[in-house]
Amino acid sequence: MNKGEKEPKPRYGTVNFEKRKHPRFNVDLPIEYYRVDSSIGHTGKALNISEGGLLLYFPEQMDIGQYIRLKLFLSLGSELNTIEVLVEVVWMDIHLDKSWGEYRCGVNFIDVSPEDMIKLKNFLRSLSG
């Protein structure tokens, strides 16, 4: 090592810091969803949620880039609120066995009304406290 160079600091273990814009919360929420080109509704579930998107389980495979209309059922105290959002599939878990009948994917919110965003933020606030 040359005289002016600093010796690198040793690193121990592996740390994976995710750089997320919004904190995520684990949930188990029922959803209804509609493909944008269909009026036939289906059910699925959300496993985590943030202000920016969701981790969902669908009973069918979705395509990355596909738009889906969702209805989320949020309980806040004794109230049951629903919010409707347009989402885009941004990733699909290809490691799950198709015979399970559940496909895991991540979606980002594309269109949320201001009223529904307030409901979502209130719900998330209730989870963080």
Image (spheres, grey):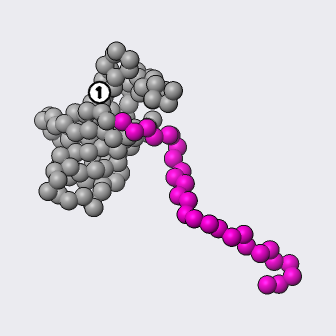
Q: Is residue 42 visible?
A: yes
As shown in the figure, which amino acid type bears the numbered disc 1?
Phe
**Residue at left 72%, top 69%?**
9
Determine whether 19 is above or below 24 in the image. below
Q: Residue 63: percent from the left, percent from the top? A: 25, 53
**Quadrant of res 50:** top left
Q: Secondary structure at mark 1?
A: strand
- The rendered magenta stretch, by its main secondary structure, is classed as loop
Location of the N terminus (image quadrant): bottom right
**Residue at left 22%, top 33%?**
32
**Quadrant of res 85:** top left
Q: Residue 109: percent from the left, percent from the top? A: 38, 39
Q: Residue 2: percent from the left, percent from the top? A: 83, 84
Q: Nearer the viewer, residue 24 or 90?
A: 24
**Residue, far front:** 12
Please state if 42 lies on the left or on the right of 20 as rendered: left
Determine whether 101 is above or below 124 in the image. below
| Residue bearing the label numbered 1 | 73
Q: Nearer the viewer, residue 113 or 71?
A: 71
Q: Which residues are magenta?
A: 1-27
Q: Is residue 61 magenta?
A: no
